[in-house]
Image (cartoon, grey):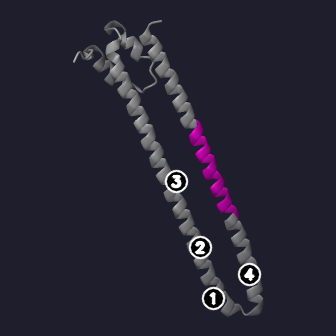
Amino acid sequence: MSRVEWLMWGILVLDVLGFGGLIVWLRERIGALEGTVKAQAKTLDTVERLNKVVLGVLSALDPERWANKVKIHKELADGRVETILEAERRQRDKENKNLAAAFSASIKTHVTDVLDLLPYIPRAQRVAAIAPLGFDEEVKSVFYEYAPLAQLGLG
């Protein structure tokens, strides 16, 4: 095999490993977020049961006065839960944006690498070298368009 073929295989292996690592990392992040959601659900169930117990005790003592206090407490607790959930949503959105930016940068790097290496492939073999790449057809069409024009820069 020629050096170019070794280089192309090397790039392919790095791409596969990189995307595999990204998938593993995403699974871990999703698992962590699922754990957070489960903990919040358990907390909400506990608060709901506690509110029912408190309502039972208070209604036995002085229904009107205690009902007003419980209502205010419930509104505050609901507001606090809503604030926590909103903060978690913002955090998740921020992480999703960061992941999207990292993924976009990775794809851009790989596309740039392919375009930089294209001049080193003999013109007759360029289309055949582009076909098996793991990019979508829109990106490949850019490579096909650029393939006959690519030349080595001799400075």
Can residue 39 be seen here? The reply is: yes
Along the polypeptide, which appears first: circle 1 or circle 3? 1
**Does the segment drawn in magenta span residue 60?**
no
Mark 1 or 3, closer to the camera: 3
Residue pictured at 48% horizontal, 6% vertical: 1
Q: Mark 3 points at which residue?
A: 92
Helix, strand or loop at label 4? It is helix
Q: Is residue 154 above or below residue 82?
A: above
Q: Distance between the residues labelled 1 and 3?
A: 36 Å
The type of residue carrying mark 3 is Arg
Provide residue 106's location: percent of width, then percent of height: 43, 34
* Image quadrant occupied by the C terminus: top left
Q: Which amino acid does label 2 sit on?
A: Asp
Q: Real-space Cα distance between discs 2 and 4?
A: 16 Å
Measured as percent of width and height from the top left, residue 93 is found at 48, 53
Identify the mark at residue 68; answer none if there is no mark: 1
Q: Which residue is drawn at 33% across and 7% down?
A: 124
Q: Name the residue under label 2.
A: 78
Q: Answer yes or no: do the residues labelled 3 and 4 have beta carbons within 8 Å?
A: no
Q: Which residues fall within the magenta stretch?
A: 24-42
Residue 90 sits above or below residue 82 on the image? above
- Please name which of the two marks, 3 or 4, marks the residue nearer to the observer: 3
Secondary structure of the residue carrying numbered label 2: helix
